[in-house]
Amino acid sequence: QVQLVESGGGLVQPGGSLRLSCAASGSIFSIDAMGWYRQAPGKQRELVATVTSGGSTNYPDSVKGRFTVSRDNAKNTVYLQMNSLKPEDTAVYYCNAGIRRGLLSARHDYWGQGTQVTVSS
């Protein structure tokens, strides 16, 4: 069994900052890419940021320069530092990780339960 548990969401004013965390636990052999996605009401889930096991990152233009993704491989944890938040960043944020449960196991995608981020004055 593998679990991804997120924390750090909440309500913040425009221009403010939040930091999300997501810890993976359970029967884990290795973790490939980890990342964050978000889904606003009435919209499709979209990529926010990804980070490979080697530390390479990827962001869409909508968050580039404002959000920073990082990971602690020893703790199986990925973080998302969000600065200069805008009302359009309001969404449920989901953690994602590509996890292998054994040396010869295929990689499977796992998702967290989601954490609400609301940017409003």
Image: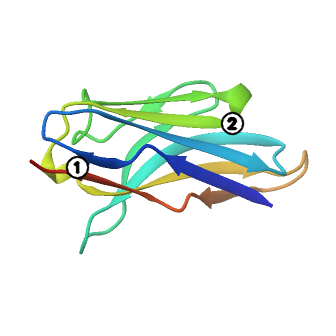
Q: Which of the 4 image quadrants contains residue 32?
A: top right
Q: Nearer the viewer, residue 57 or 15?
A: 15
Q: Indicate the position of residue 53 as horizontal and vertical percent values.
A: 64, 31
Q: Residues within 10 Å of mark 2 (few under 14, many from 20)?
A: some
Query: In what quadrant of the picture does the N terminus appear?
Result: bottom right
Q: Nearer the viewer, residue 109 or 117?
A: 117
Q: Secondary structure at mark 2?
A: loop
Going by the numbered disc 1, the residue's amino acid type is Asp
Going by the numbered disc 2, the residue's amino acid type is Asn
Residue drawn at x 22%, y 49% is 89
Q: Which residue is mark 1?
A: 89
Q: Indicate the position of residue 54 as horizontal and vertical percent values.
A: 62, 25
Mark carried by residue 76: 2
Q: Indicate the position of residue 62 as horizontal and vertical percent values.
A: 21, 42
Q: Distance from label 1 to label 2 (Cα)?
A: 26 Å
Residue drawn at x 71%, y 41% is 31
Q: Residues within 10 Å of mark 1 (few under 14, many from 20)?
A: many
Q: Secondary structure at mark 1?
A: helix
Question: Do labels 1 and 2 touch, CB within 8 Å?
Answer: no
Q: Is residue 63 left or right of residue 96?
A: left
Mark carried by residue 62: none
Residue drawn at x 16%, y 52% is 88
Residue drawn at x 25%, y 30% is 83
| Colour scheme of the picture | rainbow
Q: Is residue 109 above or below residue 28?
A: below
- Furthest toward the left, the residue is 121
- Give the mark nearest the N terminus, 1 or 2: 2
Q: Which of the 4 image quadrants contains residue 23?
A: top right
Q: Indicate the position of residue 40 as horizontal and vertical percent values.
A: 27, 64
- Furthest toward the bottom, the residue is 42
Q: Is residue 1 left or right of residue 61?
A: right
